[in-house]
Amino acid sequence: MRFTYFHLMPWDSFTAKEEEWPVKNTYFDPVEATKLYATYIDTMAYAEECGWDGIGCNEHHFSPYGMMNNCNLIGAMLSQKTTKAKICMFGNLVPLLNPIRVAEEYTMLDVLSGGRLMTGFMRGIPHEYIAYNLNPDESRARLNEATQLIKKAWTEPDPFGWEGEYYQFRSVSIWPRPIQQPHPPIMMSGGNEESARHAARNRAMLGINFIPSLAKGREIIEAYLEEAHLVGWQPGPEHILITFHTCIAETDQAAIDALKGGVAYFSSTLMNVQRNAQEIVLQKTKFYKSEKNRDFFVERLKKAKSRTIEEAIHDGTVLCGKPETVVKQIKHAQKELGVGWINTNMKIGNIPNDIVTKGMELFRDHVAPEVRDIEKTPEPVMSMADA
Amino acid sequence: MNFEKKIAKLDKGDVTYFVCGDGPPVVYLHGAGGLLKSKAHELLSAKHRIYMPTTPGYDGTELIDGIDNMPALADLTADFIASEIGEGSDIIGHSFGGWLGCWLAVNHPEKVELLILEAPAGFRPGGKGGLDLPPDELAKRLVAYPEKRPEDDRPLEMITNNRDTVRLHYHDGMPLDEALVARLGEIKSSTLLVYGTLERIVPIETCRILKEAIPRIYFNYIYDAAHTIEVDQPERFVGIVGDFLERGEAFIVNNGSGAA
């Protein structure tokens, strides 16, 4: 079993009652943010000391939801502050970006880290398309094309050009090229079955976020496995990662109390500021090809907001409690889903940083030793056929 | 499309060809299936005069005595250019035609201005790829989007005969033309090599060989296209080929057409 430590880098002291996105930036205190960045980066680097196998970042824009507009900058710092942990970029939002730039920055991270990069090729959440002024209808097609282009940029030995629907480059030969051959592992989002099938067709790892139930998680994974079979490959547990809100404390009640506070802030403040923009994109565009997937996305958000922590624990969709409890929850999730990777999000909303750090130490001392070997997860190496 | 059918009366024999458009000349050398006039040719003809000779023996035409190998066919093509165009011409060669275009550029450099190779045959080390496939599989590999295939008044038997019999008259199914590979370095023309991201007839090793050997070559992927790029993605094909024809090697510089 392998674990990644994810950090959203939220602004954790936002008090304004805003509902509009983007959020006006007079609320942003740069001096306070300098301290916050330092704390968060130290915490992320500390995850390696506490036994996590990878440290995860992602990309968001224009709100207190997350302060990593370019998560590769944070990845670069982590590459120098750590020596063993994988540097996991759980988004670049590839359709929003210049794919050659993504290829270059990811390759820099792979080289800077000595071959520890795990890449994310994410489509992003709907309102991010307003930030960079791109048509959400094009998001899936852009992701498809950019993915192929980036793989070529990583693997082509000679300069090449690209004449595509969205991207045209006449002469590409990126320096540096990746240490991991033929290229670093790629993860794609498995927010629904459509996304999971897309990941399988691209022979990518599957990353599932915040499932509403283990049963739904299983459906998504089954779609991924089925599609992979159709296109001629067989993913193992090492290709599947699932993210859980995670809170570990000395007692179950202490963990529940901390998580309740964090989730309340996350839902009512961080998520709230983007709700309007999100709804506009969902209602007025074809970000989701099918109504079923759009409805699932909306339902998942609603459920995340309305469900109590106790219900989420019961459903197996969060990891929360004293170490012995969390060990049981991890074993249960692994048994139900067959995943090789669990991605823990511990700085949820405004959970105080000392509680987060204490939880990491409890993980190191009491959780990791009990669950590390329940599944022998090998490295998710990409074969030449994947390129 | 308004292609005019003509016959070039050459010393070695007659060559049927089609011509369309106005502007600088471009000779299009067809693939092993024969001459399929497509939307791409129509688009190119807006700025160029497109000459499309039919290789003797193809599409119901007669073979010519003594023209039974690729260098000899290149000699005949040079005669065609001299007779119908006069000076040199830009060349586009698809598959079999790309192979022929390389021989033309090696043996008759004065007849070749810019050279454009569209998934050229003749450079398949170890016999990778090729046309020897069941008909259904071959069809999938030739064109990814069959609904884009233009109307073709040639009978199916004629196309099959082109591919199965006539092409062998010129190269006997040789996968790798080693004599030509040894001389690719002599190609003086600026060369554009285009290759579909869905290509499965010509292996990627072909591109490696050409990229290594031809001194001034540009290699471009055409996204979402199989072997017959001009059918699968005519606008993309003409976008890059047209730009190369217009600006030569300066085509690598964005002139406002909009990169990513």
Image: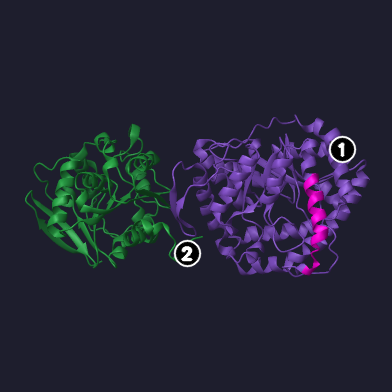
Chain colours: A purple, B green
Give the residues drawn in magenta, as a range.
Answer: A26-43
Q: Is residue A79 in the magenta section? A: no
Q: Whole-Å distance between the Cαs marked 1 and 2? A: 54 Å
Q: Residue at x 66, y 62 (%)?
A: A128
Please state which of the two labelled residues, at mark 1 or mark 2, is closer to the viewer: 2
Dominant secondary structure (helix, strand or loop) of the stretch shown in magenta: helix
Query: Whole-percent x and y of residue A119?
Result: 62, 45
User: Which residue shows up at 68% across the image and 44% down it?
Assistant: A88
Q: Is residue A40 magenta?
A: yes
Q: Residues within 10 Å of mark 1 (few under 14, many from 20)?
A: some
Name the residue that disc number 2 marks: B258
Task: Identify which residue, A344 or A47, lies in the foreground.
Answer: A47
Q: Is residue A248 visible?
A: no
Q: Are marks 1 and 2 on the same chain?
A: no
Q: Which mark is residue A362?
A: 1
Subunit under mark 2? B
**A255 to the left or right of A176:** right
In the shown orientation, is residue B107 left or right of residue B197? left
**Percent position (x, y) of residue A254?**
93, 46
Amino acid type at circle 1 is Leu
Please give the chain letter of the residue carrying mark 1.
A
In this rendered view, identify the residue nearer to me: B223 or B186: B186
Residue A34 vs residue A193, the one in the foreground: A34
Crowdedness near tag 2: few (<14), some (14–19) or many (≥20) residues, C-alpha within 10 Å? few
Q: Against A217, is A330 above or below?
A: above
Which quadrant would residue B177 be assigned to in this image?
top left
Contact between marks 1 and 2 (CB within 8 A): the answer is no
Estimate the x, y position of residue A312 in percent, counting from the top left.
82, 50
Whether residue A295 is visible, yes or no, is yes
